[in-house]
Amino acid sequence: MTAYTFDDVAVVMGTYNEEAAIEHVLSDIDRVTDGRAEVVCVDGSSDRTPEVAREHGARVIEQEPQGYGVAVREAVLAPDRPVVVTTDCDDTYPMERLPDFLEKINEGYDVVSGDRLSKGAETMPRFNRLGNQAFALAASTLVGRRLHDTTTGMRAYRTEVIEEVTWTENTGLSAELLLRPVMRGYHVTELEIDYDERRGETTLDPLLGGAEIAGSIVRVAAEEWVRRLSPGDRRSTTDSA
């Protein structure tokens, strides 16, 4: 089995008016990977986010703002490296854990999902934390496997997983990016991570966004059950962390 290094990794994110945080995120990625990981930002900002990203060596793909999922879907499909790591651009995720995500990929996992909630996620607003816990419980019930954090933005994927699945969701893409691989039998694990207080202001309405995520979880799970029950479909062999 190939042992991947950071020369084989692309770190990708959708960015929207994150001028206050993007420099910190990119500097951390550069420090942790010794500048070897490719960084791709799909950006719809009206501030200096794309300029700051380019100044720090990121590849910037500019597009009109169309929502979280549209940007992240473009980001995960853009690199040609064999390992893709998604993150958010608000400095909430621990880039120092990138070696641990890569290690899990090298152990044979197809998807490594960062679990913020098992460690408490105390810096997350309480309403958001309760909502994310509810999403995880609902998704666990629907897919038949305990999942601890279905809406995390930090995951590592083998590129073939990204390329083999058709991604359909927008606000709920983070949940879809976990649920479809789980239900299609890819080798999936969760990795507990810390979660920091975000830099800058959030642009997501928690009520509207929460409703959209809930709908995505139900829709994706239903579609995947239909697919799994079809003749000849691959069965799930996923593992817990």
Image: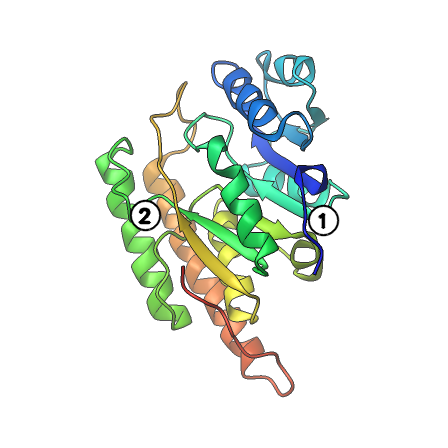
Q: Is residue 170 left or right of residue 34?
A: left
How busy is the neighbourhood of tag 1: few (under 14 within 10 Å), some, or many (20 plus)? some
Q: Secondary structure at mark 1?
A: loop
Residue at the (38%, 25%) spot, across then down: 198
The residue under label 1 is 82
Q: Amino acid at mark 2?
A: Asn
The picture quadrant where one finds residue 92 is: top left
Q: Quadrant of the C terminus?
A: bottom left
Q: Amino acid at mark 1?
A: Pro
Q: Are marks 2 and 1 in contact (CB under 8 Å)?
A: no
Compared with 225, 174 (above or below) is: above
| N-term-proximal mark, 2 vs 1 | 1
Whole-percent x and y of residue 217? 43, 59
Q: Secondary structure at mark 2?
A: helix
Count up the numbered dots.
2
Compared with 87, 212 (above or below) is: below
Whole-percent x and y of residue 60? 70, 25
Q: Is residue 96 left or right of residue 2?
A: left
Q: Quadrant of the N terminus?
A: bottom right
The residue under label 2 is 132
Residue at the (57%, 23%) spot, across then down: 31
Residue at the (58%, 34%) spot, across then down: 13
